[in-house]
Amino acid sequence: MNAFQVTLRHSERPDLSRVLEIEAPNREQAAALAAKPGFRVALVKPLKGVKKSGRAKGGIPRKELIKLFRGLASMLKANISTSDALLYYAQGLPDPALQAALMNIRNRLEAGIPVQAAFAKEQCFDSTIITIIEAGSDSGQLGDAFSSLARRIKIEMMFASKLRSALLVPSIIILFQIGLFIYSQVYVVAQVEDTLKSVRQEPDALSQVIFSISHFVQKVWPFFVIALTSFLVSIFRSAPLRQRLLIFLMGRWTLLKKLVMGLRQSAWIGTLQMLYANGINLARASALSARVLAGTPMYEDFIKASTTYESSGVPFAESLKRHTELDPQVIHMIGIGERSASLPQQLELLRDIYEEDTAAIMSDFTQVINFVTLAMAVVLIGFVFTGSMLPIFLMGPRMMQSGNM
């Protein structure tokens, strides 16, 4: 991104001027971004030695995408051209990198490049977004396509935020509790034991058990911390390990399996509905929708189902039944939609149902995680109290008797 100093002069009063500093790829875009009502661009001067800023390709935040697509959709529905909508939205944006990207797209549209190609050349929109823009353009419903994109991204962000809230805070609390337990066993309980030894008192049976646990923790805690740290690092860095761990937990925790399957099916149904409703044929929409499940065992199943539907001519619902683990209700409703030529409506109904059901399961999952976190806190705090205070309470009377003798 290059920096420019743009001088604006008032159209009716040339003695009035404004000087702005603009970041843009070239002079023309700098002038377009700096344009203000009632002023004309008098001079565009490149600035040397100014620190350049910008965003790596593909780095547009999802919140910004939601605002962008909603803004474009509203202007297109008000019969504003796509080129003008991009210009109006870009003007005044606080993010110079996004401004430049939108102006690049606008310039390509003005040069006669198709809208999907204009967006694709920026390389900051994924293939699903480009495909939906193409479908909306081909069907003459580009505004509806932008609205669908904004809604889908918002739903994905909502589920991601809830999942982070359900897992991140409890995980931090549990790690803190583990650290507190190790500290109490290594330092606090050891000091209590040394205190009893200093007054030459033998611990009772229960205190001996507590001290034995402390001795064990003192020996193994470095290895435990190293193993736990290695495990957490591996989880964050290895997608196959995360997948295997998730499959293992899903096989033993029904609520987690319902949540994961609900999230995956909701994402697939929502994407399929968005693509199919914007004019993409069912076979291609199915193949593209499978991409939201890439990296999961369901991805290959949906690709097989899409290939079977396209090549063999069997109904789409039948191909899903053969190859996937979708809920029977989903397959049943898709079959009804195929037979009654109401598949877009059935997919929209399924999308809403699964988004609501998944939100409810997410709430139950959060409550269970919070209960587990609270239970672990009670247990670990109990260990800390028992290890540090109980030996003193038990040995107190004996120590007092020893002092009186």
Image (cartoon, rainbow, N blue to C red):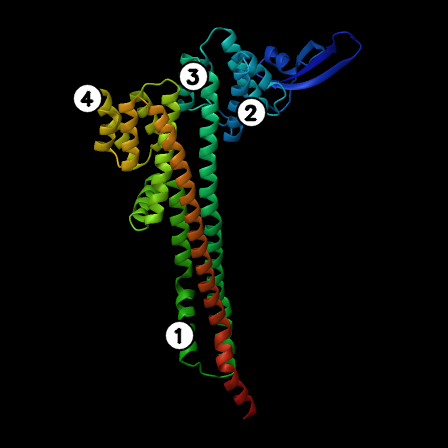
Give the structural element (helix, strand or loop) at label 3.
Answer: helix
Residue at position x 61%, y 11% from top? 27
> Would you name the residue on which mark 1 appears?
209
Please state the horizontal and vertical placement of residue 168, each as a whole percent of the image: 47, 47
Please state the horizontal and vertical placement of residue 4, each as a whole percent of the image: 65, 16
Q: Quadrant of residue 114?
A: top left
- Sequence-wise, which precedes: disc 1 or disc 3? 3
**Could you give the CA–CA distance between mark 4 and mark 1, rounded to whole angstroms?**
70 Å
| Tag shown at residue 57 | none
> Would you name the residue on which mark 2 appears?
54
Q: Is residue 187 left or right of residue 46?
A: left
- Sequence-wise, which precedes: disc 3 or disc 2? 2
**Could you give the CA–CA distance between mark 2 and mark 1, rounded to whole angstroms?**
62 Å
* Residue 58 in view: no
| Tag shown at residue 136 | 3
Nearer the observer: mark 4 or 1; the answer is 4
Residue at position x 39%, y 40% from top? 357
* Residue 139 in view: yes
Please state the horizontal and vertical placement of residue 377, each as a whole percent of the image: 47, 60
User: Identity of the amino acid at label 3?
Assistant: Gly
**Could you give the CA–CA distance between mark 4 and mark 3, rounded to whole angstroms?**
28 Å
Q: Quadrant of residue 330?
A: top left
> Would you name the residue on which mark 4 appears?
312
Q: Is residue 306 left or right of residue 380?
A: left
The C terminus sits in image quarter: bottom right
User: Identity of the amino acid at label 2?
Assistant: Gly
Evaluate if marks 2 and 1 touch, with contact meaning CB atoms under 8 Å apart. Answer: no
Q: Is residue 297 left or right of residue 166?
A: left
Give the structural element (helix, strand or loop) at label 2.
Answer: loop
**Could you give the CA–CA distance between mark 3 and mark 2, rounded to whole angstroms?**
30 Å
